[in-house]
Amino acid sequence: MAKAPRPHWRAPEKIQARARRLRSDSTDPERLLWRRLRGVQVSGAHFRRQHAIGNFIVDFFCARARLVVEVDGDTHAMAVDHDRARSRWLEGRGYTVLRLTNREVIHQLDAVVERIAEEVSKPLP
């Protein structure tokens, strides 16, 4: 029997498999934030973690708000141009990208969650 065609919104299988691996290898700040985002704890919004969009894997994603939340560690300091290009690509497709640092998530978690709640509550253009 022939395999059914993949829906157009699905990322390539290779990217999906990498996203699954990343879910089990989350950083401490990502795990900390995920405890606050999982379920519908923030403004009733559902978030996914390590979600594939195109050829990218984003840390957290809320489809309802078209919001991408990225938690950047120290290694991102060396990838500024890559991160900027990636954000432009996502924004060009109608997503809002919110970049946070590990330090913000660890030391200002309540403020971070409040910023995310504000973004989720904004009306879509």
Image: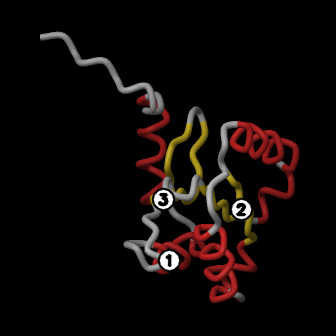
> Which residue is identified by label 3?
49
Up the image or down, 71 lies above or below 113; here it is above
Q: Nearest the camera: 109 or 39? A: 39
- Residue type indicated by callout 1: Ser
> In the rendering, at what x and y percent does residue 43 appear?
50, 77
- Looking at marks 1 and 2 on the same chain, the residue that comes earlier in the sequence is marked by 1
Identify the secondary structure beneath mark 1: loop
- Looking at marks 2 and 3 on the same chain, the residue that comes earlier in the sequence is marked by 3
Left or right: residue 96 compared with residue 8: right
Mark number displayed over residue 43: 1
Mark number displayed over residue 98: 2
> In the rendering, at what x and y percent does residue 90 appear?
69, 42
Q: Nearest the camera: 122 or 33? A: 122
Q: In this view, which residue lies farthest toward the top? A: 2
Q: Nearest the camera: 98 or 66? A: 66
- Looking at marks 1 and 3 on the same chain, the residue that comes earlier in the sequence is marked by 1
Between the residue at mark 1 and the residue at mark 2, the CA separation in whole angstroms equals 16 Å
Between the residue at mark 2 and the residue at mark 3, the CA separation in whole angstroms equals 14 Å
Q: Nearer the viewer, mark 2 or mark 3?
A: 2
